[in-house]
Image: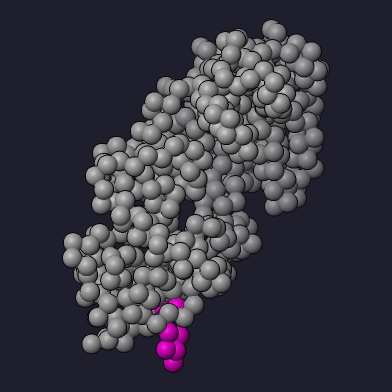
């Protein structure tokens, strides 16, 4: 009997098994792992956005398999670990040299799948290839690969190299996808080897914690959202006051306050030597009053030149480029909303563009934008870096529109600026300068709550759904209606915020 069969047939009595995803969860927060194992009912429901992210990851994985063709796939359900292990060993016995979703389990109960288990021709060792839809190696990827190597080696597999296969953000699509160029294979032997010695002790500690019936204590902190948003955040944060310092400070500032046993912004001392914008926030919350700097507002308003063009874009950013002359995760604009006001307090005209065909929207978008934005007057956006970058990329792709797009950029005024610098701050903004936080705080009769699409990520996902060919016509029509309402709300919000500033 070879080592693979010996090791997988040596389970501890009543051992605790732990998967790779559970191990990564435990590294981020042991309490989250305990809750996952003992109180899964406390987890937040998986959002549509996360489901779509999972789907995208699976699609990317299958594309990556094309770089290692003619492999054999383990199709046993993810929860049928022993069957998947048996299937893996059977495929090896049949002479397979490339196995997708190969599965192994160590004698101590750590188990995982590997996206591609590959043996080079005439090689004695197997390479482990983990596929990610990122564009580079991240720290938690090393934890992933280290765990996988630990499991497969402990299960008796002779392992050669540990690779991360990720998307190549320098790849530009021209014609059919070229999988060998779309993906980059990065050797991670060195960082994996450095982390391997830590795994047995970490596993032992996590398994010991899992066996306990008492919920472990863990203070809230940055680990609640890094590297992943924890599905138990709502549970752990439910009793955290709205004025807790965790909600307003990050990094070293937060650490310094906690070291002084300061947990509420009302307890931050008057001599706190933070940035001016942080002092404005503290004073506003302590006094329960808005901060308004009339001179700062006046300086900002003097930068405006009528007519005003209130502009907002919606984009898709697919992991795998859909159109020629685009790259992984490149922002592709498919919609804009534009409100135009010729004089202060005057009537407002609305123009919009939405590309409704499953084709590259950029040419039609650029043509409509240039035609609608005129040649003079301020172009008001919220977060100028976004729209200006899209325009630069459009100009590079479509030289016939470059001059006009550059001129639009030169006319841009960033409405985010007075709120980010806290020239205006309302306690209801809760430390955020995002449009979704600022609008209801300053213009309470307006908000996004009644919209079917109420954020940019959902807008992007729903548009991708529309052009995927999986949508019925009635469903597509409704989504396009909802997209128009959402984008229109963004630019109408800009109109109302400028009105607010003029009143002050």
* Along the line of sight, the residue nearer the viewer: 234 or 335: 234
Quarter-of-image position of residue 298 = top right
Residue placed furthest toward the top: 503
**Image location (x, y in percent) of residue 66:** 44, 72
Residue placed furthest toward the front: 260
| 486 with respect to 252 (left or right) | left
The magenta region covers: 118-127
Quarter-of-image position of residue 327 = bottom right
Can you see residue 407?
yes
Number of numbered discs visible in the structure rendering: 0
Quarter-of-image position of residue 172 = bottom right
* Along the line of sight, the residue nearer the viewer: 249 or 326: 249
Based on the picture, tell me whether residue 121 belongs to the magenta stretch: yes
Based on the picture, tell me whether residue 321 belongs to the magenta stretch: no
The residue that appears at 80% across and 18% down in the rendered structure is 299
The residue that appears at 76% across and 45% down in the rendered structure is 402
**Image location (x, y in percent) of residue 492:** 59, 20
| 500 with respect to 28 (left or right) | right
**Image location (x, y in percent) of residue 231:** 37, 41
**Image location (x, y in percent) of residue 83:** 21, 69
Q: Is residue 504 above or below residue 157?
A: above
Can you see residue 145?
no
The residue that appears at 60% across and 51% down in the rendered structure is 330
């Amino acid at each position: 009997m070879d080592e693979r069969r010996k090791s997988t047939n040596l389970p501890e009595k009543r051992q605790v098994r732990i998967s790779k995803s559970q191990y990564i969860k435990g590294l981020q927060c042991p309490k989250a792992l305990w809750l996952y194992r003992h109180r899964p009912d406390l987890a937040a429901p998986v959002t549509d956005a996360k489901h779509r992210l999972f789907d995208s990851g699976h699609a990317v994985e299958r594309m990556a398999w094309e770089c290692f063709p003619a492999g054999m796939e383990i199709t046993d359900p993810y929860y049928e670990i022993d069957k998947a292990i048996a299937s893996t060993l059977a495929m090896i016995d049949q002479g397979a040299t490339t196995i997708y979703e190969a599965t192994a389990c160590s004698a101590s109960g750590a188990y995982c799948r590997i996206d591609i288990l590959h043996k080079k021709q005439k090689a004695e060792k197997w390479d482990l290839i983990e596929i990610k839809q990122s564009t580079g190696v991240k720290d938690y990827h090393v934890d992933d690969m280290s765990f996988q190597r630990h499991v497969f080696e402990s299960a008796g597999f002779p392992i050669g190299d540990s690779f991360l296969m990720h998307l190549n953000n320098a790849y530009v699509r021209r014609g059919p996808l070229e999988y060998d160029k779309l993906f980059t294979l990065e050797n991670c032997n060195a960082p994996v080897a450095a982390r391997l010695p830590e795994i047995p002790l970490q596993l032992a500690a996590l398994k010991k914690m899992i066996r306990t019936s008492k919920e472990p204590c863990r203070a809230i902190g940055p680990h609640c959202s890094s590297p992943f948003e924890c599905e138990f955040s709502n549970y752990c944060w439910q009793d955290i006051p709205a004025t807790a310092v965790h909600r307003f400070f990050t990094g070293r500032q937060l650490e310094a306050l906690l070291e002084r046993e300061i947990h509420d912004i009302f307890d931050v001392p008057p001599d706190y030597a933070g940035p001016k914008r942080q002092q404005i926030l503290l004073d506003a919350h302590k006094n329960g009053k808005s901060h308004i700097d009339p001179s700062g507002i006046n300086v900002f308003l003097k930068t405006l030149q009528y007519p005003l063009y209130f502009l907002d874009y919606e984009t898709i950013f697919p992991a795998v480029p859909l159109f020629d002359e685009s790259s992984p995760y490149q922002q592709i604009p498919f919609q804009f909303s534009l409100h135009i006001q010729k004089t202060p307090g005057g009537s407002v005209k609305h123009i919009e563009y939405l590309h409704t065909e499953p084709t590259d929207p950029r040419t039609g978008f650029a043509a409509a934008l240039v035609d609608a934005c005129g040649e003079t007057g301020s172009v008001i956006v919220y977060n100028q870096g976004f729209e200006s970058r899209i325009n630069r990329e459009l100009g590079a792709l479509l030289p016939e529109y470059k001059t006009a797009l550059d001129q639009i950029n030169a006319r841009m005024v960033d409405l985010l600026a007075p709120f980010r610098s806290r020239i205006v701050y309302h306690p209801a903004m809760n430390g955020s300068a995002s449009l979704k936080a600022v609008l209801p705080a300053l213009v309470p009769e307006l908000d996004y709550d009644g919209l079917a699409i109420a954020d940019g990520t959902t807008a992007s996902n729903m548009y991708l759904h529309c052009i995927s060919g999986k949508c019925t016509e009635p469903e597509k029509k409704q989504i396009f209606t909802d997209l128009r309402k959402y984008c229109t709300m963004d630019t109408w919000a800009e109109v109302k915020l400028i009105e607010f500033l003029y009143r002050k």
